[in-house]
Image (cartoon, rainbow, N blue to C red):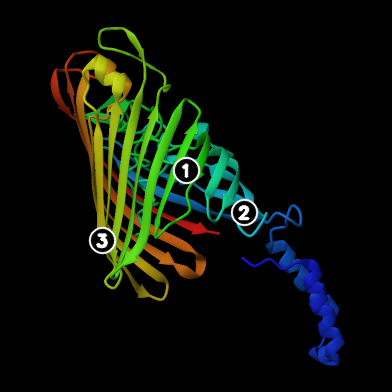
Amino acid sequence: MKNLSLSALVAVGVLAGMTGANAADLGGNCCADLEERIAELEATTARKGNRKVSLTISGWVAQQVTFWDDGVQKNAYVNDVGTTLASHVKFTGSAKISPDWSAGYVLHLEGISNDSLFLSQKNDNAATAKQVGVLQSFWFLKSESLGKLSVGLQSSAADNVAILPDGSGSLVAANYVLFDNNGFFLRRSGVLQTTTWGSLATCPGIQIGVSADCDGVPNNNVRYDTPTFGGFSGSASWGENDIWAVAGRYAGEVAGFKLAAAAAYTETTDAGTFTTLTGSSSRLNGGALQIGGYLQHVPTGLFVYGAYGKDYNYNVSKYSGKVDGDNYYVKAGLRQKWSSLGATVLFGEYGENNDKQSIALWETGVTSSNLSQWGVGVVQEIDAAAMSLWVVYRNFSADQTCAAVNTKACGTLGTQSFDDLQMLKVGGMISF
């Protein structure tokens, strides 16, 4: 985006009037036309807060229609794509201190109208999540040679690390986080249960995020990012709830292949408490590993993306005997520009969450669980409008194993299978 100041535009107009008397030949009032153009530019240009600090406004708006069928009920909702991916506007500013140093800020606002994370068979309008709120707010100091230090409400070093390498153009439409069905209730033999799909894909030791994106929500922290050396970069952060994270990334192109990879580890010693199977209470202390990678053959457009995550529920495992959960996700397809509109992305996906049931399910005797998903989809990019449109079909299935019978989660001993949940999403996103 190019900013043109009012004074510069007036100067150009005056100069044109001085050097060419032919302006009157154009017909009409040249000055009135110039004023109209100035007003037009002012209406579409972000104004600076002062003459030293720049201001850039960016973001996107994303909405979709979700058709779902749980085997007994079916419906269609108009909803967002989930918090952190939902419609937002970002204000970014920076000021040059010296040739090597700069300072700046980020104010990131997210607008939620109907958050997909909270939708269910009982709730077609997530009114509790309807808001325009602050997702990130921080300042930074940056050196081109030494790196960047940020302080405030922001993503940790591990936030979304395994998701972001996905360069296929289908990241928002399809990823491993359960944005689509997190709040939907499970059914078993047609009977609606009291537990949700999201309860089988949690991060018990950290208590934030879903699936492998365990450190997936911005928090108040201090973060350091290294400069990029040969495509490699690193990050580290420390913040509230005694949580720290480290991450490493790579992005580049080698012999006609586009490569991107990232890995991160997060740990906290203050994520809350849980009740052991013997009835005693203990503090949560856990960690999470996440790895993501993307490979695309540029000439043909063939690509594959994969992600893996593992929970380390240190004292939870010690007191309950519960094994650490893990999950993986694979997406492969073709990205090609078959029309002047933009690239078309065709893909298929498969993923699993194993033994990632919630603390509440552990406490009621669920000793193991599995949630699997598969899907197919198409994304059409429209370059002239910075827009993407998508159609995605997804199928979810799950089971759990119970060591005790109770009225909350385990009606019988042994393994219990749940009814499949099917979803069809038709949506779009436009960036600015």
Q: Which residue shows up at 36% across the image and 62% down it?
A: 252
Q: Amino acid at mark 2?
A: Trp
* Circle 1 residue: 84
Residue type at mark 3?
Answer: Gly
Q: Counting other residues with Cα less than 10 Å from the Cα at mark 3, is it few (<14), some (14-19), or many (20 or more)?
A: some
Residue 408 visible to an observer of this rendering: no
Q: Which mark is residue 333?
A: 3
Secondary structure, mark 1, is loop
Instruction: Say which of 424 and 175 sits in front.
Output: 175
Q: Position of residue 281 (x, y in %)?
A: 35, 10
Other-residue count near label 1 (Cα within 10 Å), few / some / many at <14 / 14–19 / ≥20: some
Residue 243 quadrant:
top left
Q: CA distance from mark 2 to mark 1?
A: 30 Å
Mark found first going from the N terminus, 2 or 3 = 2
Figure label count: 3
> Which circle's residue, 1 or 3, is located before the other in the chain?
1
Q: Is residue 280 visible?
A: yes
Q: Which one is in front, 216 or 344?
A: 216
Residue 8 % position (x, y): 78, 71
- Distance, label 2 to label 3, CA atoms, is 42 Å
Q: Which residue is mark 2?
A: 101
The residue under the point 39% across, 43% down is 247
